[in-house]
Amino acid sequence: MKYTDLKKFPTNFLWGASTSAYQVEGAWNTDGKGPSVIDIKRIPEGTTDYKVASDHYNRYKEDVALMAEMGFKTYRFSIAWTRIFPNGTGEVNKKGIEFYSNLIDELLKYNIEPLVTMYHFDLPLALHERGGWGNRETVDAFEQYAKVLFEHFGDRVKYWLTINEQNMMILHGSAILGREASKKELYQQNHHMLVAQAKAMVLCHQMLPNAKIGPAPNIAYIYPASSKPEDVLAANNFNAIRNWLYLDMAVFGRYNHVAWSYMEEHGYTPTIEDGDMEILKNGKPDYIAFNYYSSKTVEASKGDGNDLNNTGDQEIVIGEAGVYKGHTNEHLEKTEFGWEIDPTGFRITLREIYSRYNLPLIITENGLGAFDELENDGTVHDPYRIEYLGKHIEQIQLAISDGVDVFGYCPWSAIDLVSTHQGCKKRYGFIFVNRDEFDLMDLKRIRKDSFYWYQNVIKTNGEQL
Ligand code: BGP
């Protein structure tokens, strides 16, 4: 649909950007922080670990000042569970509370709204060793953790996100977390995470009546490779399994029927305890946050063994025999890392989510990973990132013109950080961090071209892209 005049971005639109604790903070064992699953992760050869990352733990003031200079209205970051509870449960670590309290105060000093992810992939190792999300106790541990966060930060944090990309941990856990699990186990973990999320949402509303909370899955609309009904059905299958399973539960408190039938057919259905469905019904999000990098395309699975299980990374679809098969969309370009680029798919995804759930939306990740280069004169030219982000912001405005209620945009990432499985040379930030895969150099912060560009986007409230 074309419009003669586009609707403007709302005046209080939350422009910002995102990071996650383990990818940016470093200080992996400082001030009482306990180990998380990230510290035992199988690190792909040739890439760095997460011990120092971007050293944000020690340089957060400088980083926040740069975000303020860009004009951020919000900053989406995650809290490392193991800074608060080094062993997942038990004693609260005061130093961990202090760090995030200081970070929040620093943001508020510049009128930057903190947008806090409670859990972004870094499950405490102590819980993992007792079965992780496969163990029901982790649900209680998460609820306890949520309570402590609300108690200590609820006076200043209005926007909460429960679990980052739960769907990607289930579908692509091997790339992100570096370990394998059977699908049966994964869907049990999934159920426990859904219950934990619902409990956190209920608790948030009880303890902080003025706060808002929502889920943060990775949602990408799935296209059929052709108009062949079998391909359309495969896209419908994958939309249910990848996207709606998570949001139907978060919003309506019920399992999506196609996803459930898929689990039944394969013997993946989780054990549901008495009272779970009621908890799931009671947990109600105030908004939906989602991460979007690209649409996905699938064709019908022939079930002939060529469409093996889904083992690509977050944005690469392989397929599942008898359900769907990944298909390269010949209409789209790809990033250097093989991720398709589809700004129009962003608008389609925004429309689709809003039509299904009718809740305000905020984008908590979107961005382009690239090998940026620092020039001799100290500049970093990243026109490809500006182009990517500009085209996606254009689509948000179109979606707003379609009547979608979008209240914020937080691309990935505020500052360079370590990728989930491709090291620190795969960069996403507006701020360059001067380090190499294995040489920490001086970790100096350098404004990229996209820094100045985004500053102007925010200043003009999205009018100049
Ligand atoms: C998302 C994760 C982020 C982030 C991003 C980019 O799936 O939520 O943590 O890393 O993808 O992915 P990558 O780091 O693999 O390039």
Image (cartoon, rainbow, N blue to C red):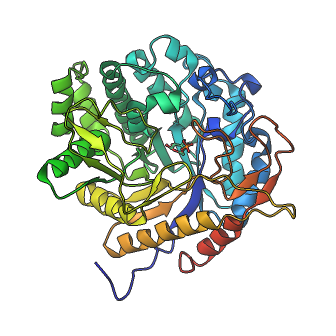
10 over 148 or under it: above or below: below
Instruction: Determine whether, in the image, residue 92 is placed left or right of residue 98.
Output: left
315 over 375 or under it: above or below: above
The answer to whether residue 390 is visible is yes
Residue at x 79%, y 40% (from the top left corner): 58
Q: Position of residue 402 (x, y in %)?
A: 31, 73
168 over 394 or under it: above or below: above
The residue at the far top in this view is 130
208 over 415 or under it: above or below: above
The residue at the far bottom in this view is 4
Residue at x 75%, y 34% (from the top left corner): 52
Q: Position of residue 272 (x, y in %)?
A: 24, 21
Instruction: Determine whether, in the image, residue 434 is placed left or right of residue 194.
Output: right
Residue at x 43%, y 46% (from the top left corner): 213
Instruction: Determine whether, in the image, residue 84 is placed left or right of residue 438.
Output: left
147 or 57: which is nearer to us? 57
322 or 19: which is nearer to us? 322
Which quadrant of the rendered structure holds the C terminus?
bottom right
Q: Position of residue 274 (x, y in %)?
A: 21, 19
423 or 365: which is nearer to us? 423
Residue at x 64%, y 20% (from the top left corner): 35
The answer to whether residue 255 is visible is no
Which quadrant of the rendered structure holds the N terminus?
bottom left
The residue at the far left in this view is 229
Total numbered circles: 0
192 or 262: which is nearer to us? 262
Q: Position of residue 155 (x, y in %)?
A: 57, 46
